[in-house]
Structures are given as C-alpha cells and as structure tokens.
Amino acid sequence: MKCRNCEQGDMLEIHENYHYRECGLDNVTIVGITTRKCPECGSVMPMIPNIEGLHACLAQALIKKNGPLRLQLQKKVWKEAA
C-alpha cells in the first residue's frame, strides 16, 4: 500500500503501542495495535479495530473522572460539540 501522504513509500505494518494524540487527550495509549508507517516521509496510520468502542470507553472515563477537565481538553470537547 502506498503512503497517502507522500505517495512514494510503501507502508510497513508494525505491531506496537500507539500514543493516540488524535483523541485530544495527552495520556491515551492503545496497546498492541497494527500501525502502518511510511519509510519515506514518516507518516503513521494506526489501524484501530473498534474506534467507536474506543471513543465510547474514553467518553465514559471522562464522565466518571473526579475533578475538573484541563483547559486543553475542554476546548477540544467544546469544539466537537459545536
């Protein structure tokens, strides 16, 4: 599979832990998933098997969290709610 970013490199599949920054939280790591990496540009594409379930789990964890949300997270939640 060619890289969607640079269209040059062939993506390499790697089984690893993935720091899921795209969710807007600093401390979420998905353990033991397949990622595709481009050797040319360094682009990484995680293959998340049940992203809807993951997001539901993260939402439940936030709902049950004691204490206030940090400002960075609040901005992300407000942006997506709008």
Image (spheres, rainbow, N blue to C red):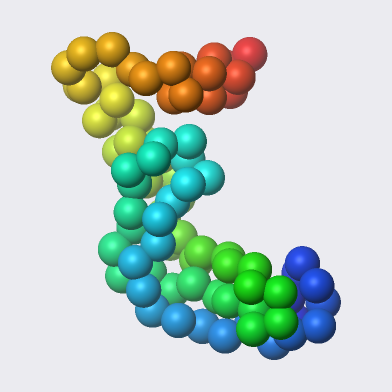
Considering the image in quadrants, where does the N terminus appear?
A: bottom right
| Residue 52 image point, x, y percent | 44, 44
In the picture, residue 32 is in which quadrant?
bottom left
In the image as oriented, which residue stretches furthest toward the right? 7
Taking the spot 44% from the left edge, 51% from the top edge, the residue there is: 20
- In the shown orientation, is residue 78 left or right of residue 62? right
- In the shown orientation, is residue 6 left or right of residue 15? right
Q: Is residue 28 above or below residue 42?
A: above
Taking the spot 53% from the left edge, 18% from the top edge, the residue there is: 75
Residue 9, visible in the rendered structure: yes
Q: Nearer the viewer, residue 59 or 11?
A: 11
Taking the spot 64% from the left edge, 73% from the top edge, the residue there is: 42
Q: Nearer the viewer, residue 53 or 15?
A: 15
Residue 77, visible in the rendered structure: no
Considering the image in quadrants, where does the C terminus appear?
A: top right
Q: Is residue 16 above or below residue 8?
A: above
State the count of labels: 0
| Residue 63 image point, x, y percent | 27, 20
Taking the spot 21% from the left edge, 22% from the top edge, the residue there is: 65
| Residue 30 image point, x, y percent | 34, 57
Q: Is residue 35 above or below residue 39?
A: above
In the image as oriented, which residue stretches furthest toward the left? 66
